[in-house]
Image (cartoon, grey):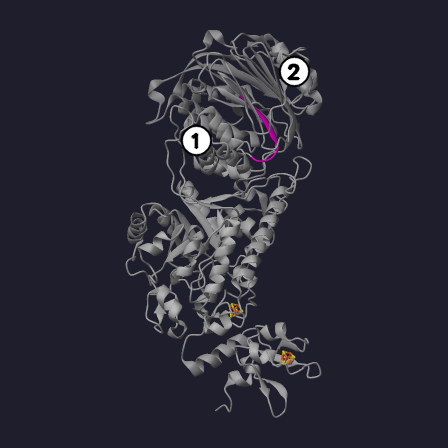
Amino acid sequence: MLFKKPQVAFYPFMVLRDDYKCVRCKSCVDQCSFDATYYDEDLNMIMNHHENCVNCKRCEAFCPTDAIKVVKNPSTFHPDANWTPEAIRDIHVQMLTGAVILTSTGNDKPIKNYFDHLLLDACQVTNPPIDPLREPMELKTFIGRKTDQLQFDSDGVSIKTTIGKQLELEIPVLFSAMSYGSINLNLQKAMAIACREFGTYWNTGEGGLHKSLREFKDHTIVQVASGRFGVDLEYLETSAAIEIKIGQGAKPGIGGHLPGEKVNEGIAETRMIPVGSDAISPAPHHDIYSIEDLRQLIYALKEATNYEKPVFVKIAAVHNVAAIACGIAHAGADAIAIDGVRGGTGATPKSLRDHVGIPIEMAIAAVDDRLRKEGLRNEVSLIAAGGFRSAVDVLKAIALGADAVYIGTVAKLAAGCTQCQQCHTGRCAWGITTNNPKLAKRLNPDIVAENLYNLLRAWAHDIKELLGAMGINAIESIKGNRLRLRSWGLTEQENKILGVLPAGM
Amino acid sequence: MACGCYSEMAGCGLAGIVNRDGKKISGKFIYDSITAMKERGNGMGAGYAAYGIYPDLAEYYAFHVMLDDLDYESEVNAVLSKSFKIVKSEMIPTKEVPSLYKKTKPPYFYRYFLEPRDDARLPMESEEDLVVRTVMTINDKVKGAYVISSGKNMGAFKGVGHPDEIGDFFEIKEYEGYIWLAHTRFPTNTPGWWGGAHPFTLLDWAIVHNGEITSYGTNKRYVEMFGYRCTLLTDTEVAAYLFDLLFRKHRLPIRAVFMAMAAPFWKDIEHYKEVGLEKIYEMVKMIRTVYAPAMLNGPFAMLFAFKDGVIGFNDRIKLRPFVAAEKGDTVYMASEESAIRVICETPDRVWMPKAGEPVIALLNHCKEEDVCYPA
Ligand code: SF4
Ligand code: SF4
């Protein structure tokens, strides 16, 4: 049998250090949370355990003399389109552990990104583009149950019709559910501050709401997932909206999982569980085995909160998503959040992350179409999630038919994440997806809040520029306006599903 | 044609006159007014709408039907007879205008005066719905026939030509009406189809439009949810259906309709609150929230007429020209002041309406705005 574990023998990354430049400051040793570097006193040299390196690049960022580069290991397996290094490594892991392979972040396989196959329109001659720096350009978006028709009183001013409570967004972008536990309080706080400043919402995820964040109530969406962690009346009331989490794009069909070793005192208190106990959400809600049960939970939450909170339902984009979304609308949800196959997570089995679900672009188009056909589109808002990378993706999603977009990975990136896919280990060197106090304090909530605010501001500018070029000065005029999209390189069938024309038509 | 292709693009000129006392105005005036703006069009489309032109048959629905061939008349007749008693039918008098024939062969025009049959209505269908259904049936199903207007005591006249050519063709100067609309077009492509000219009408209302609606896809999919079928692929058609939905079906107050279609900016809505107009603030905010997909974006000026008046309005940042004037009981609206001055040298008042703010010129009998409604 093997002399060394294959993982130790064949590793994907290497830490190259220029010994001439290295001043032995040991920053890299100190910063590396994966034990990939160490100091050898006898040799007075910094050495590596390459096999431990995850390419998080924390050491590169901290080396004062630019002595380090983390590179792909040039020694790899025989080129083989089937037996890729990843496929071989997965076998190596499973033959040793006998377990599913856990991973994190979003699907990293080259699943066609339809946003990259959609192009936006602009005005020329027959109608003027609008200059967003000189003219008003409106991104205000309302999320919540509306109605088809308003009825006025005889005075012509008072409106008899009432509609559900709305969330008012200054940009059609919200922060996606990331629980306390999967991420730490510092990032949650940073998101909460940025939302309050900018005028949008963050989502607690399924880990409850830490008491220090209650002051951000008006910008908080509280999640109720199958584990019901941290859920009590006060929690439900300390919110702008409530989200029932049925599923998530990175792991459709299974629940959240926080290992006991990550459950420290703060998390335990917030989740209302003992310190050190595993926080495992069941795959289903055990009170929801069918759509009528969902309706009961929606109304139970509404009753509990006096019909003052919009209730969202979040699902993963699975094959039959359009019909499911319609059922959710019928069940009384005020908004449906749909998380596509590229949706990220703090921990998931790799097989689910990479192989379950459908692209969010297709899901938006199908759901928007179906809701319209059923006359339900004005009754419910549609929030898209899963792999959104830029303001352009957001705008394309809205043109396809979404009301707003949830972003998660982007928030992590703005906090320093380098997408190393190690969130599930709890060792995030950037202090994001870890609750190890030494690591978590690497994330300064105030600085990250500013970064997140800047990011929202930049995206708002981007969207405004794009809208202006299209001769549109309010976001509602691009919503579902698929005529301002053209596709390239898609099949007729794909165009039909997306409801777009190919370029040139 | 199915919905889905690109909306048509066009530049245009428009004009409207209303006598608020209901006094008749000769077609000569509107003819001169729109012809003064001839260079805003390119001779590929012009039209007129007139109210009060059939006083003796005022209680009947007047259908103006365009026929590519006279043979199709019997089919139209058959569709109409299913739901209506045909009180009178005749060819619309036209004059030979040689220059028109260089562009297209003019179609034939018939008009029918119709009384709905009680037994024709479907369950829950109103008389107006029956008229709309019949119009859609003819337009959709009868090849070579197209209904260009269907209201009472009103009619549309339109075709491929300059406004003076079309005016001469239909002998517009011979008609007298208390409301007139006119339009001249500059389409970027050459449709060559008479039905594509403005005004666009349904029941007793008519619209003329200058502009390109950048929100077309949003608006189209919105009205489709309420059962409308966009067959003409023009911005104007979708605007027309929005009017029908908001005015006739939802019965919104007139001002609310325009607040939905040319919504005030949020900063202006906030301003209502700041100055203590809490109730108005709530109303406008609610309209904008619920009717967001009904907002028309992009450059436009539009005149909307119905039996009780004319309403003119502009896009939210006034990207197309729009002037209004009044003299005594007569209100004028046009793309250019010259089009008004040419028929009314010394108006009492001339003004440039603000972006998005409608000019509402209702007949004097409409003291309360909400008693006057488009059919
Ligand atoms: S951080 Fe750079 S300089 Fe410091 S020990 Fe590591 S490699 Fe050497
Ligand atoms: S959050 Fe941390 S562990 Fe997760 S991918 Fe980003 S850098 Fe890696």
Q: Are marks 1 and 2 in contact (CB under 8 Å)?
A: no
Q: Is residue B156 above or below residue A100?
A: above
Which of the two residues, A164 or B101, is positioned nearer the viewer here? A164
Q: Is residue B301 magenta?
A: yes
Which of the two residues, A68 or B159, is positioned nearer the viewer here? A68
Quarter assignment of residue B354: top right
Give the residues drawn in magenta, as a range: B297-304
Quarter assignment of residue B137: top left
The residue marked by circle 1 belongs to what chain?
B
Quarter assignment of residue B60: top left
Residue annotated with mark 2 = B340
Image quarter where the C terminus of chain B lies is top left
- Taking the spot 53% from the left edge, 75% from the top edge, the residue there is A86
Q: Is residue B3 left or right of residue A121?
A: left
- Taking the spot 36% from the left edge, 17% from the top edge, the residue there is B117
- Taking the spot 44% from the left edge, 79% from the top edge, the residue there is A94
Q: Is residue A333 left or right of residue A447?
A: left
Neighbor class of circle 1 (other Cα within 10 Å; few <14, some 14-19, many 20+) is some
Q: Decide if residue B191 is in sight here.
A: yes
Q: Earlier in the sequence, mark 1 or mark 2?
A: 1
Residue kind at label 1, given as amino acid type = Lys
Q: Is residue A491 above or below residue B272?
A: below
Q: Is residue A345 magenta?
A: no
Label 2, secondary structure: give it. Answer: helix
Residue B224 x, y percent position in the rendering? 46, 36
Tally the numbered discs. 2
Residue annotated with mark 1 = B279
Whole-angstrom CA distance, mark 1 to mark 2, is: 38 Å
Q: Main secondary structure of the magenta part?
A: strand
- Nearest to the eye among marks 1 and 2: give it: 1
